[in-house]
Structure formats: C-alpha cells, structure tokens
Amino acid sequence: MNRLLLLLLLGIVSLRSYGQEDGNRSLHYYIETAKENSPLITDYRNQTEIEQSELERLKAMYTHSRLELNGDYLFVPIISKDGGRIAFKWNARSATDYYGYDLGESSGSLHAGATWTQPLLGRSSYKMAQEQAQINTDITNNRIRMEEHQLERSVTEQYLLCLLDKAQMDFTDSVGTVIDCRIEIVRKLVENGLSKQSDLNLLMIEREANAELHIAARQSYHTHLMDLNLLCGIDDATDVALSEINLSVRLRSDREPSLFTEQYRLDSLNTAVSLRSFNLQYKPKLDLFVNGGLQVGDFSGWYRHFGWGAGLTFSWTIFDGRQKRWKERQSGWQQNSIQTYKDNSEYQRNMRIRQCLSELGKYDERERALENQLAEYESVLSDYGKELNVGQVSVLDYITVLRSKIQTEKERLLLRTNKQLVIAAYNYWNW
C-alpha cells in the first residue's frame, strides 16, 4: 500500500514537472535569467564584496596594532697587515695597519628583535574610510540596478520581436485556412462548369505564396528566439512557445528620485568624501611603539645585550606648498562637471519621455484607422465570398481584396509591436 502511494506521488510530481517544462516561457523568465547570467552584474556584486574586504583591511591598518620581526647584520671587512702578515678579516674590532673603513667610524653590528606599533589617532581615518566604502557600495548597487533596468528593456524588445513573428505565423495559418476553404468551393464550381480552371490555379498560387510567408515568419521567429537566448545566456537551440504580453505605461511619482539622476548624486557625494579623505593627511598622527631584541657591536659579549625600548612617533603636516588649496579647486571643478552632466541627462530623459507619449498618441490614431479599414475589407470579403460561392464574382477580384487585407493586417501587427516597443522605451526612461 505504501509503495503504491509512493508511486502515485512520484507520478503526480513527474506530470507537474512535465507540464512546467512544456509550458510557455514568460517574459519574466527571460528577464530573471538574463540578470542571473549577466557577467557585468556578477562583477558588480563581486566589487561590493571586495569593497567590504578593503574596509576590514583599512580598519586593521588604522585601529589595530602591528607586530613586526626585524633585524640587520652589518659586515665591515678589512685587509689587515698587522705583524707583517696580510690577512682578510670579516669583522675586525681592532687593527692598526689595514685597508678598509676607518674602524673608529664604522664597525660590524647585529640587530635582531621585534617591534609592536599601535596607532593612537586612527579612528577618524577609519570613520572616513567607512563613509567612503558606503558610498562606493551605493554606487555599485546603483550600477547593478541600472544594468538590470537596461536588461529589462533589451530583453523585452527582443521578446516583442519574437511575438511579432509568432503573430505573423498565426495570421498566415488563418489566411491559409480561408484560402483552403475557397479552393474547395471553386474546385466544385469548376467541376460543375460554373468557374474556370484558371481561377482555381490562382487560388493555388496564392496558397503557395501564403505558405512561403509562413516559412519566412517561422524562420524569423527562430532567429529572433536564438538572439533572445543569447542575450539571456540560455544554452538552448529549440523553438519554444512564448507567452503573450500586453505592456502598459508605468507611471512614477515626481517625488520619487529617478534612477538616472541617482548616479550623479552619488558621484557628487563621492567627490566630496574624496576631498575630506585627502584632507586627513593634514591632521596630527601619533603612534606608540615598543621594540625589543638583541643589539650589539661587540660580538664577544652578545648575550648581555638583550633589551627593549618604547616611544612615540608624531607627525603633523604644517605646509605642503598649497597642495590642499589646489585639491579643493579640482574638487570644485569636478562638482561642476557632475552637475552639468546631470542637467543634460535630465533634459534628454524628459525629452525622450515626451517623445514616447507623443508617439503613443499617434499610434492610437493609426490603429483605429487600420481597424476601420480592416472592418471594411472584412465586409467586402464576406460579400465576395457569398458571390464566389455561386460563381458571381471573379477569383481575381477576391484575391486582390484578400491581398489588400493581408497587407493591412501586417501593418496593424507591426504597428502594435512598435507601440509596445515605445511603451517599453517609456517605462525605461520614466524610472
């Protein structure tokens, strides 16, 4: 009984998995996959982790003590001639007749030990490093949002091209059904002598032309779908079905900061923090150090010369040739450039938003006109169809009107896709 229940559950899970795999892929799936596979977004996220690691390193440098092992051994070799014997000595302590450094001024020595240093005034530097790291993290996070926003637009536009091909395939299928129906009717009329064989041949030619349009649309769908997979980092060469979408204009409150202006605000903050960080070098620096070990010049009694010492190191820059003044001027010009770029970016963004709204209004007018035209074509074809059934109208007239309707329908499909593309562009800029 338990095995039967287990097999039943496994069967249900398998059916659900199969249904999910066979289901249409949505725009959300492609957008999320593109974000997940984007190397640039991965790089930005790694930069955030690097920034946090750098902050921990600076914390250790500014606030933690440091212990160093150090040492040096000085050789002062000479060539001695004392006692009439010429000899090479590595470290002579006494000689009267020799070639080499003056032993009264320089002699061999050994120093080996450890030094412990503790910064005493590093808190302000670490606090500034924290502020700088936070701004760098905000800049990186904003770049991630910008890249995700750009991917949303790019993937949406490519997705719409695939849907346009899919709509053209469906349309050619519907046209093919109509032509097949008319062929059967005309064939019966030809058999009864009520229509000419040439009329049937014209419909056959039209069916072949429609079949070629279907093949072209299917090929275009495959090409655009492969480009979509390439954009999203999907390793799949099979044609899959896509879910239909209907984009709508996404409104944003004027009080909400724009994603495009946020980068300039962060750049301005970064410039100000960089200046304050530069000015830290003009504050006093005070370190405590303790060292200990062996320091000898006379190697014969080296074991008696272990010891230790402690002290303070202090530094304070009073004058640097007016570097600080020139740095402040550089910062001011950088702020001016950032403000100029920000104003120009806002101008272009607002112009693009107004352009999109203007185009959407024109697309609505054109779509209404095409729908009226299609309704008239549909009425004429309906009348022609009735007359064609009884052989009262030529097939050539019917095909002429049908081609005109097909062309108008193509224009409407293209117009609807272009309208969706404009909505995608509007939603991109109005963010």
Image (cartoon, grey):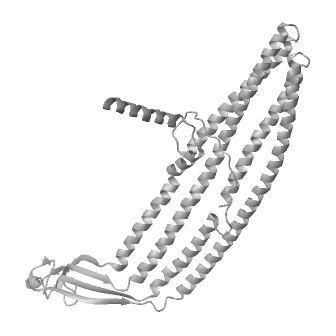
Instruction: Tell me which corner region of the image, top left, top right, bottom left or bottom right, holds residue 5.
Output: top left
Q: Residue at point 41% right, 71% down?
A: 55
Let me know if residue 229 appears in the view. Answer: yes
- Residue 45 lies left or right of residue 365; in this view the side is left
| Farthest top residue in view | 192
- Residue 10 lies left or right of residue 297; in this view the side is right
Residue 102 location (% of width, % of height): 21, 87
Residue 392 location (% of width, % of height): 92, 17
Q: How many marks?
A: 0
Q: Residue at point 42% right, 83% down?
A: 124
Let me know if residue 400 appears in the view. Answer: no
Residue 100 location (% of width, % of height): 21, 82
Q: Nearer the viewer, residue 273 or 179?
A: 179
Q: Nearer the viewer, residue 328 or 364?
A: 364
Q: Nearer the viewer, residue 184 or 66?
A: 184
Q: Nearer the viewer, residue 398 or 72?
A: 398
Q: Which quarter shows the N terminus?
A: top left
Q: Residue at point 49% right, 88% down?
A: 320
Q: Which quarter shows the C terminus?
A: bottom right
In this rendering, the answer to whether 397 lies above or below 49 is: above
In this rendering, the answer to whether 382 lies above or below 223 is: above
- Residue 7 lies left or right of residue 300; in this view the side is right
Instruction: Tell me which corner region of the image, top left, top right, bottom left or bottom right, holds residue 261.
Output: bottom right
